[in-house]
Each structure stands twice: as C-alpha cells, then as structure tokens.
Image (cartoon, grey):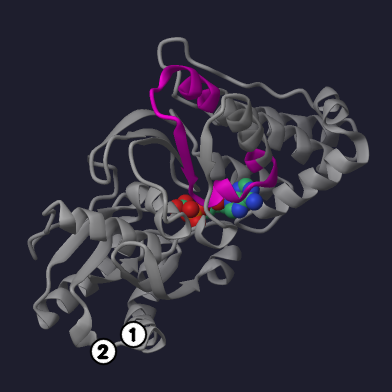
Amino acid sequence: MLILGIESSCDETSVALVEDGRKVLSVETLSQIEIHKVYGGVVPEIASRKHLETVAGLTQRAIESAGITKEQIDAIACTNRPGLIGALLTGFSFAKGAAYSLGVPLVAVNHIQGHIAAAYPAFPELKPPFTALSVSGGNTFFIRVKDYTDMEVLGSTRDDAAGEAFDKVARVMGIPYPGGSTIDRLARQGRERLGIAECMKRFPLPRPSFEDAPYDTSFSGLKTAFINAIHHAEQTGEEVDKEVLSASFTEAVADIIVSRFVYAAEHEDSDTFVVGGGVAANTRLREKLAAAAEKYHKKLFIPPLSVCGDNAAMIASQGYYDLLAGKIAPLDENAFANLEY
Ligand code: KG4
C-alpha cells in the first residue's frame, strides 16, 4: 500500500511516499529555519504562509522522485495534531483536497505517534509492544506503545519541552534558533576539554523529579538556573565558559530523561525501547540511553539523525498503521493545536 505523507505542524514542510509503512520511496522536506532565525523562534503566521507556498511543489517532487504516478497513491496521511494551528491547517487542508481529488482515504496522524513511527522504516524488525520516548521542540512524552495504534501516555513535561529548553538557553547565549545542535557541539567540546565531572562542578544545575508522577519532567527550572548562571557571570564581570555551561546543561537534560528511562526499564514489561524526536539527535543523550539500555538488557532503537526531526516519512508510516486499523478521517475533520488521544 502506497501512502503519501504530509507534515506541516511547525517549521518543516515535508512530503513523502512510503510503501507498507516501512519502505521510504521519497521524502522532500523544506526547512523554514533560515526564515525564522532572525526572529529567534518560529513565527506561526509566517510558517503557515510558507507551508502554503511550498506544499504543492514538494508533493510534485516527492511523486517524481519516487518514480510513481499520483494514481498509484492508496491514501493520504497528514499530521493534524498537535502543532501550530495555522501551520497544521495548511497541510491538512491540502491533504483533504488531494484525498478528495484522488478519491482515496484521508488519515489524520498524531505527530507524536509519527515521531515514534520514524523508527519503523529504520528498523524492519521493530514491532510493538514497546516503550517509547518522544523528545522534540514541542513535546516530551513517555508512551506505552501497546500496538501500532493503541498507546498510553505514561508522562510528559509539565512546562517546557526538552528541545524548547535547549532553544531558549541557546538564545540567551546569542546562539541562533534552533540552538539544540549547537549546544550539543559546545557541550562535546566542554566535556572533552575538562571532563563532565568538572563541568558539572563549575555549573551545578538541578534535576527535578515528581514523586507522584515518575514519568513527568520539568525543564523550566533548569532553564532558569542556566540563565541565572549567565546573569551572575555578567554581573561579576566574568566571562561565561559557554562550552562548560553547555556541557553541564546537556548533562542535566540527559540525566532527567535517562532517569525516567531507567524507571521504565525497572517497571515496564517491555524489553524494547524506541526514542524519537529532534532531541533524540543529541550526542550525550544517545550515549547515556545506550549505556542504560545495556545495563538493563533492553533493546534500544533510535533512528538515524536524519529522521529524528520532523519529516513526512514518519507520518506516512504511522498513517499506514492507522489506515490498517480503519482510522479514516472524514473530509470535515479538524486540526488541533493540542494533543488529543
Ligand atoms: O522534532 P523536531 O524537528 O521538531 C518538533 O517536533 O519540535 O525537534 C526540533 C528540536 C529543536 O528544539 C532543536 O533544538 C532540537 O530538536 N535538537 C536538538 C539537537 N538537534 C535538534 N537538541 C539537542 N541536541 C541536538 N543535537
């Protein structure tokens, strides 16, 4: 079954063709990062307009590079939640038009489930049940994946998402949006130069947890502690060692996430873990998750860096399983800024 996937929930317009949920024939993605960079973050109205300008051309290109004709498409799968509402509506309205004109089913895909599905094309042997972690610029979720379309949220962030925290502290250091990958690089340099123990000693940062909700996370206190460290240095005329501060911050984010992973390893039945979302590209987080998985004898699947961020192949993959489960959206289906399971 050939699914055309469309993703437009934030600042990437992406269109992909995926066969049977696992074989990616083409992915055409246009990132808007350069446009939003000057504003220090995504401007929703500009994002919507850019999606509108580019989605048709990307669809044409995705069809051409897959070497198929549009008549071969069996269904259209498109993100309709959660995300920036205008951005979602642009892609989803286009998807409705495409489904109607081709006379094929429309599938409304949950973006978070899409991030989890990014692992399906990368790992053909991967099958639910497993425990998943989706860490991106907008969300931080621990999810019990009972089946391809049957999932239960174990916990999520109570304030900032992990990627959002990376982007916000980067901004304070004058690093352009989105700052996660730059902080990752600075942190690597800090660790190599001084060792992580010394970085943490120079900039001690908190790792909050919640006794009543072991999977919930919070990153805003950590972000504030980081910003306070910068302000303190400015007031005392010291120069901030960005590499060391980034290393300490990255370690704290990784520790917060890995401690939940360890809790899941100890309490969940599954022996398999899947990690997705833009922050899954983080070097230190990947290292620490791999070490924890080895210690607890768990299988860990983290897709390649190229598919950790937003892309339409993951939406087409999840859309395939949604379609198999009979989840066909009516043409008057809406888009939702917040998550609705
Ligand atoms: O999944 P994604 O492309 O978009 C959302 O659905 O949010 O994730 C983007 C987020 C941004 O916050 C970005 O700073 C972060 O992922 N990110 C990273 C790294 N690469 C991207 N954060 C930490 N380390 C990285 N290497």
Quadrant into which the C terminus falls: top left
| Image-based side of 177 in relation to 18, left or right | right
Bounds of the magenta segment: 260-286
User: Magenta includes 198?
Assistant: no
Work out whether 60 lies above or below 228: below
| Image-based side of 101 in relation to 241, left or right | left
| Image-based side of 74 in relation to 207, left or right | left
Residue 82: x percent and y percent?
31, 49
Residue type, label 2 = Thr
Residue 305: x percent and y percent?
58, 57
Quadrant into which the N terminus falls: bottom left
User: Magenta includes 265?
Assistant: yes
Task: Name the residue that disc number 2 marks.
Answer: 69
| Image-based side of 180 in relation to 98, left or right | right
Task: Name the residue that disc number 1 marks.
Answer: 63
Quarter residue 320 falls in: bottom left
Q: Nearer the viewer, residue 290 or 175?
A: 290
Residue type, label 1 = Ile
Quarter residue 89 falls in: bottom left
Q: Residue at x 33, y 85 (%)?
A: 63
Q: Nearer the viewer, residue 198 or 224?
A: 198
Residue placed furthest toward the front: 125
- Is tag 1's residue or tag 2's residue first in the polypeptide sequence? 1
